[in-house]
Amino acid sequence: MTASFIKSEDFPAFVTAMIEAGPVYGPVAKRSRFAFERLETPDELRLDYDVSILPPKKLFFPPTQDLIHFSGAGYEAALEPTEKILLGVHFYDVKAIDQTDLLFSERNYDINYMAHRQTTTIVASNVQNVSSRAFFATVGADVQPKGHDAFMTAFGYPAIGYGYVFEPRTEKGEALLEYGEFRPASEAQIREAADENAAVLEQCPEKLGYSTEEIAAKVRAAFGNDGMWAAMAADCFSCGTCNTVCPTCYCFDVHDTWNVDQTSGQRTRYWDGCLTEDFAKCSLGEGACENFRDERASRFRHRMMRKATYLNEKLGGPACVGCGRCSAGCTADIADPVRIIDQIMAS
Ligand code: SF4
Ligand code: SF4
């Protein structure tokens, strides 16, 4: 599919036309940070964001999601997916969406996730500002993002114009061209877009110094180093923030809630996180239970095993895309995968 170009001055009208056609979500400012929200006007869109507080997966896999409504007469799906456009997703978050697409569609096909996913057109955009703890350039670097419908790169130089190169990847992405004043992109503009996307990889403040395979082997071999895991987890509050903000975490819990009539209610799922104390607590029946990861160290270790080694074969790379959200979000500042991996590699 051929690349197009839209001038900066025509871009707000493009976004407005999409908003008028249906729901559009994109990064907006939340005080000094950013969040993916539904856009009311093009002015709200902040494609210069560094990283969003929560990843855009919340559009397909919300923190709280009713699955079914039931009554004495039976049940019905709570699912009401609507066609929507998700604008401005950074490439590392597209890679994370690719992972959740796989995990929610293999074996037990998750209709609740996939229905939202299939009704969303994703337009990725280049990283204009790099967040303070990002290391996306050196984690799973050979894994290419693929779940987006178009990729948009902003740049501006007098010789080639100020605006966006828009590269459709699917028919859904190409269909968006009808909303804006696009023209074919020149060779120079396409080259500049590629240069912009390559240059940002040099700006990550953090770097992994080892290959995916080296890390996977060493992390797995460190499983039995109890003293090391205990020391790393000593300051952990078990708050689960590192799970909650992670674009590749996908665990959830399911609760049934009964209405006062005791015959109707809803089944709801909630994000869950393996760092929280009761994540691995199982019922043994008759009021008894067992928590098979009741120590902080075992929960801390489990997260790193999942991110760096357990899922690699299935996903074709690590279950971490280097967004740095966990590093920035951890109150104790002990969740940074780069620091943890450096420590493990040195052990
Ligand atoms: S590592 Fe940090 S963010 Fe994660 S549960 Fe422990 S204290 Fe919370
Ligand atoms: S583990 Fe941390 S850096 Fe890696 S994808 Fe999750 S939140 Fe981002």
Image (cartoon, grey):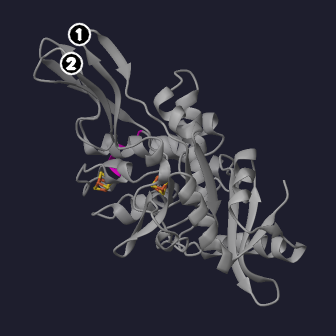
Q: Residues within 10 Å of mark 2 (few under 14, many from 20)?
A: some
Res 75 seen here:
yes
Residue placed farthest to the right in the image?
Answer: 187
Q: Residue at x 28, y 18 (%)?
A: 70
| Mark 1–mark 2 CB contact (< 8 Å) | yes
Residue reaching furthest to the top? 73
* Front-lying residue, 19 or 189: 19
Judge by depth and name the residue closer to the eye, 47 or 24.
24
Position of 54 with respect to 146 (left or right) is left
Label 2 sits on residue = 264
Query: How many marks on residues?
Result: 2
Rendering coords of residue 315 (x, y %): 62, 38
Query: Which stretch appears magenta?
Result: 224-228
Residue at the spot x=30%, y=30% of the render? 268
Residue 53: percent from the left, percent from the top?
40, 61
How many other residues sit within 10 Å of disc 1, few (<14), some (14-19) or many (≥20)? few
Q: Residue at coordinates 74% horizontally, 69% vertically from top-left?
A: 181
Of the residues under marks 1 and 2, which one precedes in the sequence?
A: 1
Q: Is residue 243 left or right of residue 48?
A: left
Q: Amino acid at mark 2?
A: Ser
In the picture shown, does residue 330 fall above or below 128?
Answer: above
Q: Kindly identify which residue carries mark 1.
A: 72
Q: What predominant SS class does the magenta segment belong to?
A: helix
Q: Position of residue 166 (x, y in %)?
A: 74, 64
Q: What percent of the width, then of the height, locates residue 124?
A: 63, 58
Q: Quadrant of ligand 1?
A: bottom left
- Which residue is depicted at the point 57% across and 52% down? 85
